[in-house]
Amino acid sequence: MVGPNPSTNGHAIGSTRDEPKLIVESLEGLRPKPLRWLVPGRIPAGLVGLLAGDGGHGKSMTTLELAAAVTTGRCAFGLKYPDPVKGKALLVSCEDDWERTIIPRLAALGADLTRVLRVKGVKLKSDGQTLDFHLGHYRELERLLKSDPEIKLVSIDPAGAYIGRSGINEHKDAELRTILDPLNGTANDTGATVLLVKHLNKSASVSAVQRVGGSVGYVNAVRFAYLIAPDPEDPDRKLMMPIKANVLPAGTHGLAFRMEAIEPDEAREMLTAVWPDLDPNETTELAKQMFRQRWEDGVTNDPNEVTGAVGKRNDKSRVEKCAEWLCGLLRARARPSKEIEAAAKKAGFTFDNLKEAKVKLKDQGLVSSNRSCFRGVWWSGFGDPDEWNSQPESSSAPFTPFTPQSPFSPPSPHTGKTRGIQSGESGERRETGERVEGGGRLFDNPPMPLLPD
């Protein structure tokens, strides 16, 4: 079967309907435009960019630092450059509380709050109803930016939340492009910088670019992207490194910063200068939570190596958490290894986490054994296996996914279906009376483990 002719959009030749035509034009009439900067050599104007990182390492604080710099006309990121841009900043945020987090942070950074705007929603003309804003409202965003050209920065934090609200699956590149491509057009047409804030995924073994959560379309669609991550050698020092630098000058290096608390007297003075009617007790409490970034220049770290090192450190942290969890699980009694593995998986730990946690706890007396009365089945517990308490202290003890009969106690009346390996000496199958020879057999519905003869 022959398909429709693509040149006729599926209509037969000779159809009375108009045939579509491809429109082309010469580049002769177009004039080149120089790249403009919100922060020279770092943050271009009129483009969409990305700031990615794990939570708690300063992504949101960095966007607020940029907003504070723009609203006051000062240099950003601790840099020095001529003629810093002054304008308004538009913040789109749903993770941090405005009164308790964002406004105190902006005050600590010296922002001009009269020039900081926030998006509260989208009002429909027809009935005056207000809808939640999402990035499907890029036309409404473009109209706002064109009506107020003083808006130089738009920060969307986190971008994934405002993509998801539009009904777009951010993990599908084609769908994501239907939002990000028009957003690029909005930035180009208005000259405003649009900065998307994104979390990282958990894939520690991939490149820094692939660590950005959602589709790879995020990094492909933006024109510049930065990663914020802790310095592997000094976790209190945060690195801001370019991971996509299509429009940045060749050899652009990263920056670093540390969070530093503002002295209480200075913080109180900053607060009362903006809000003279604040209650003194509120001023004192707010002063305790005010901090700012102290910037450092000249970072040459490879972001791929940094994310790999951070991932390894996170894995180490998981082992420590697993060891703490395992202590709690085995404190009251010893348990079979299969039960421990199932419970660890349910608690969110990998087999490798559990294996390393057991090694870590050997110095604290953790022992694993399959000898003597265990009849080949591995158990783990603290102290001498001959003295292990293998049974719950009360019937209220939590049920775990795999609880075979203890080799220390009388048979259980339970005959429910389980799956496991029987091994050891000859014995009698309790459910059927069938004689079972030693050496180990795998049953689809085995009885509870055999007791010693």
Image (tube, rainbow, N blue to C red):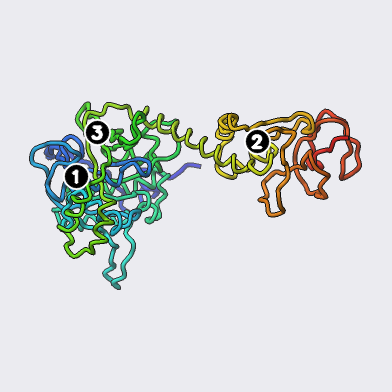
Residue at the spot of label 1: 46
| Residue 60 on image: x %, y % | 30, 47
Q: Amino acid at mark 3?
A: Leu
Residue ID for mark 3: 255
Q: Earlier in the sequence, mark 1 or mark 2?
A: 1
Residue closer to the observer: 228 or 194? 228
Work out whether mark 3 precedes mark 2 in sequence or the reverse, and give the earlier one: 3
Residue 310 appearing in the image? yes
- What is the x, y in percent for residue 235? 35, 34
Q: Nearer the viewer, mark 3 or mark 2?
A: 2
Give me the residue at 75% from left, 38% from top: 420
Q: Residues within 10 Å of mark 2 (few under 14, many from 20)?
A: many
**Does 45 sit above or below residue 161?**
above
Nearer to us in this view, 152 or 239 = 239
Q: Residues within 10 Å of mark 1 (few under 14, many from 20)?
A: many
- Report the residue at 75% width, 44% height from top: 418
Q: Is residue 113 above or below residue 301?
A: below
Label 3 Cα neighbours within 10 Å, binned few <14 / some 14-19 / many ≥20: many
Q: Is residue 145 shown to the viewer in this render?
A: no
Local secondary structure at mark 1: loop
Q: Which mark is residue 382?
A: 2
At label 1, the amino acid type is Gly
Disc 3 secondary structure class: strand
Instruction: Tell me, for residue 422, which label it has, or none.
Output: none
Q: Quadrant of residue 256?
A: top left
Q: Is residue 403 left or right of residue 206?
A: right
